[in-house]
Image: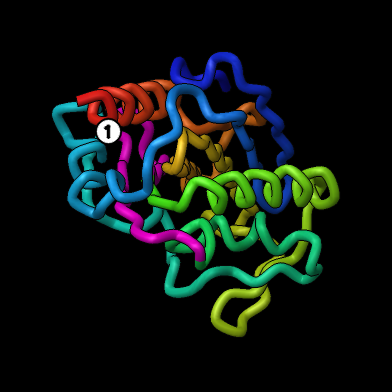
Amino acid sequence: MRPKAAARAAVLTAIALLAAACAGPPDGPVESVRTRTPTALERAALTAHDVPGYEISGAASPDDTRGAPRADRAACAPLAEVMGGAPDDRARATVSRGLGSRRSPGLAVSASLSAYAPPDAGRLMDGLRAALARCGTGFGTELDGRRAASVLAQGAPAPVHIVVVRRGATIVRFMAINLSGKAPPDFSVPHDIADRQLDKLIRTTED
C-alpha cells in the first residue's frame, strides 16, 4: 500500500496473527508537538464527508481495545502495543475514528492520529521496524489476561492489517479487520481511507 502522502516511503508487510506495515521516514516538515493538540488532531481526523461509503464514529478501533495487547515475546511488544488505544505510552494525545464499510459488510477500519514529541515519534517507528523484522511471521498476544492466538470472525481466524505512517511529530495508524470470515488473501486497509486521512492531515498542518 502506498498512500499519496507517503509515496516515497518503504512499506513492510507481514500477515500472520496481525499484518503490519510501517511507512517512513516522515514526508514533509517536522511539526512541533505544540501544534498537535487534541483540538488540532480533531480538525485533521476524518468525517463522514471525507469518506463517503463509510459509517463513521469516534470509536477507538474496529474491535475491543479495553487495554493494549501484550505480546508473548518482548521483541514483539511494539507490534502488540500499536494495536491498542494509543501506539504506546509516549503519545501526548490520540484521536480515533471507527469506520464501517457500506459496500463490504464485515469490514471495520480505524484511523487514528497521535501527537508525539518528534524524537519519540522517530523511536516508535524504529521500534516497529525492528519488531516487524523479528516477529513479522506471527506471535501470541494476551488482552486483559486472556490469551488470543488470533482474532476470530464467525469462528475462523480473521486477518488484521495495520499501517503506521509518521508525518513529523504525528503518528497516523490505520487498522482493518474483516469480521465476515471471508477476507481475501490480499486483504488490506482501503486505499481511499488512508489517502484521504493523510491528505487531510497535510492540509490541516499547512493551514
Does residue 176 sit above or below 66 in this rendering? above
Other residues around mark 1 within 10 Å, as few (<14) / some (14–19) / many (≥20): few
Residue in front for this viewpoint, 184 or 93: 93
- The residue pinned by badge 1 equals 102
Magenta region: which residues? 90-111
Q: Is residue 150 left or right of residue 32?
A: right
> Whole-percent x and y of residue 17?
70, 53
- Regarding residue 159, the answer to whether it shows in the image is no
Q: Is residue 67 left or right of residue 206?
A: right
> Whole-percent x and y of residue 20?
64, 42
Which quarter of the picture shows residue 162? top right
Instruction: Look at label 1 and name its amino acid.
Output: Arg
Q: Residue pushed farthest right? A: 134
Residue at the image position 63 percent from the left and 44 percent from the top: 125
Residue at the image position 61 percent from the left and 21 percent from the top: 9
Q: Residue pushed farthest left? A: 49
> Whole-percent x and y of residue 205?
28, 30
Q: Is residue 10 left or right of residue 109?
A: right
Residue at the image position 39 percent from the left and 37 percent from the top: 31
Q: Main secondary structure of the magenta part?
A: strand
Does residue 93 sit above or below 50 in this rendering? below
Which quarter of the picture shows residue 199? top left
Residue at the image position 45 percent from the left and 20 percent from the top: 5
Does the magenta run of residues contain 105? yes
> Whole-percent x and y of residue 98?
31, 48
Does the magenta run of residues contain 144? no
Does residue 89 sit above or below 58 in this rendering? below
